[in-house]
Amino acid sequence: AKDFGIDKALKDLGLTDINNGTSTGKDFFSNGEIIESYSPVDGSLIGKVKATTKEDYEKVITTASNGFKEWRTMPAPQRGEVIRQFNDELRRLKEPLGKLVSFEMGKSYQEGLGEVQEMIDICDFAVGLSRQLHGLTMHSERPGHRMYEQYHPLGVVGIISAFNFPVAVWSWNTALAWACGDACIWKGSEKTPLTSVACQNIAARVFSENGLPEGISCLITGDYKVGEMMTHDERVPLVSATGSIRMGKIVAQAVAARLGKSLLELGGNNAIIVTPDANIKNTVIGAVFGAVGTCGQRCTSTRRLIVHEDVYDKVKDSIVDAYKQLRIGNPLDENNHVGPLIDKDAVKNYQHALDKVVEEGGKILVEGGVLEGEGYESGCYVKPAIAEAENHFEIVQHETFAPVLYIMKYKGDLENALDLQNGVKQGLSSAIMTNNLREAERFLSVEGSDCGIANVNIGTSGAEIGGAFGGEKETGGGRESGSDAWKIYMRRQTNTINYTTELPLAQGIKFDL
Ligand code: NAD
């Protein structure tokens, strides 16, 4: 690890005291059991943090609620200025943070840097947004009345995030929520606690340098039990949760039971449709990156390839060939394409999927397997695999968070491909590869893809922050990041002002006393 500058990265991020579980920053009160963070890259222990206890949580929620009261009164453009300063720090620390993301999560260093770049981009967006939290004005039906709507800060926003985007998802939520005047409490993934501490320390430092109260950014650490403290807490009006569908169903019910709001960003089962008019070279690049990038651990990873029979063999052979070029190994080494899975449980799920697809009648086109020997000591490195499968197989209907690509054939009209593409419970990302305008437009039409993201001539993964991000059906329906996703972090108020000496009633109702 030292060869790749991890120690320096930890030092640059101020994480110098992380082996006794006391690496607490400001606004970080955890005193519970020790959580150890092991790198999937080489299996080494990176550091330890303490989990949040119930008593710690009470302190956090009180601090956040108090912080919110002050933060909400600061004019939004001034809040934007604080976000700009936070963003300067991200720019300054992009390399060490990107490196820690890579080492703790296992994605490539380039992707680690890309993830921090997403944080930078969303902060830029949030700074502009801080001057654009617009409401509408309407014409009142009553004379001498004015009617408009405005957006006020919502309160304390709870953020629960997954291991695979350990820092970007937090910033998608916080940057907007802070611009909107909310305080945030973040429970990062228990699998990537150190990146959470690093981010929290940066945020807390910037708030403190601006003389702002503690609690505008808070971190709680631990597993689902710590997450549940927020989902059941009515002092948290909005819970934004990113992770598995299983988790989303539990969180949604807990939050709904107290009539809170939830924003859910859950699993996908993303497909690329390849039509006879596709550019095959681009299809191969898009599909391979989509399937093996981040070792298949993106919510938008390509899981299914739905290929027209006319080009099936050509596409299949080209992709199988491309897989032969893949170099698997340390993600900090830029020569490698594929890094490790997050942990050994993920390896088991991967192996299970490969067994299951064969059991259900699928045919393996590119063999999988767990790598052993020098450089693979963590036990988390696997070979990206491809199986010929049918859409209705139980395992194909399920999101396996690993580099397993299912390839299937469609015949005749595009409608048949769309039936397969939409024929799963998830609805996150989708793509079509075609140079045929009719097919492309049909894919995007009301009768086309039912996903939150539908791309033409690019793959399923790699969204930009400018658009709203999220998906339909069991993906949870939430939208984060760009466009008007900010509205969920605010409460909307409709205001009617009477500037006459009369009191006319709406709908022309007469009520004379
Ligand atoms: P996970 O569901 O195991 O955990 C996600 C987070 O939820 C963790 O912080 C975990 O501690 C917490 N959690 C789990 N159960 C909880 C409960 N009952 N109450 C409160 N919190 C709880 O997911 P993971 O393995 O970390 O991440 C992989 C999953 O995340 C995949 O399904 C992937 O598709 C999905 N994901 C979706 C998006 C998206 O934007 N749609 C983005 C990234 C990841």
Image (cartoon, rainbow, N blue to C red):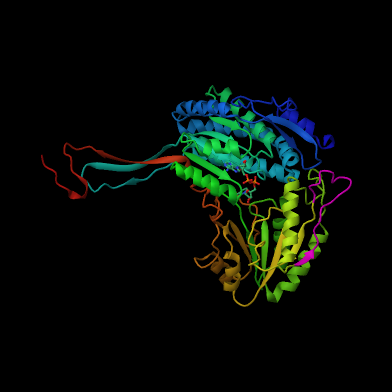
Which image quarter is the N terminus in?
Answer: top right
Magenta includes 365? yes
- In the shown orientation, is residue 102 left or right of residue 227? right
Which image quarter is the C terminus in?
Answer: top left
- Residue 450 image point, x, y percent: 54, 62
Q: Main secondary structure of the magenta part?
A: loop
In the rendered image of this protein, does residue 507 appear above or below residue 211?
Answer: below
Q: Which residues are magenta?
A: 363-381
Image label count? 0
- In the shown orientation, is residue 291 left or right of residue 377? left
* 174 or 285, nearer to the observer: 174
- Residue 266 image point, x, y percent: 58, 50
- Residue 426 image point, x, y percent: 58, 58
Magenta includes 29? no
Locate residue 391: give its quadrant.
bottom right
- Residue 181 image point, x, y percent: 47, 34
Q: Residue at x 65, y 52 (%)?
A: 462
For the question of whether residue 171 can be seen, the reply is: yes
In the rendered image of this protein, does residue 404 appear above or below residue 373?
Answer: below
- In the shown orientation, is residue 271 left or right of residue 325? left
Q: Residue furthest right?
A: 374
In the rendered image of this protein, does residue 117 appear above or below residue 358?
Answer: above
* 131 or 166, nearer to the observer: 166
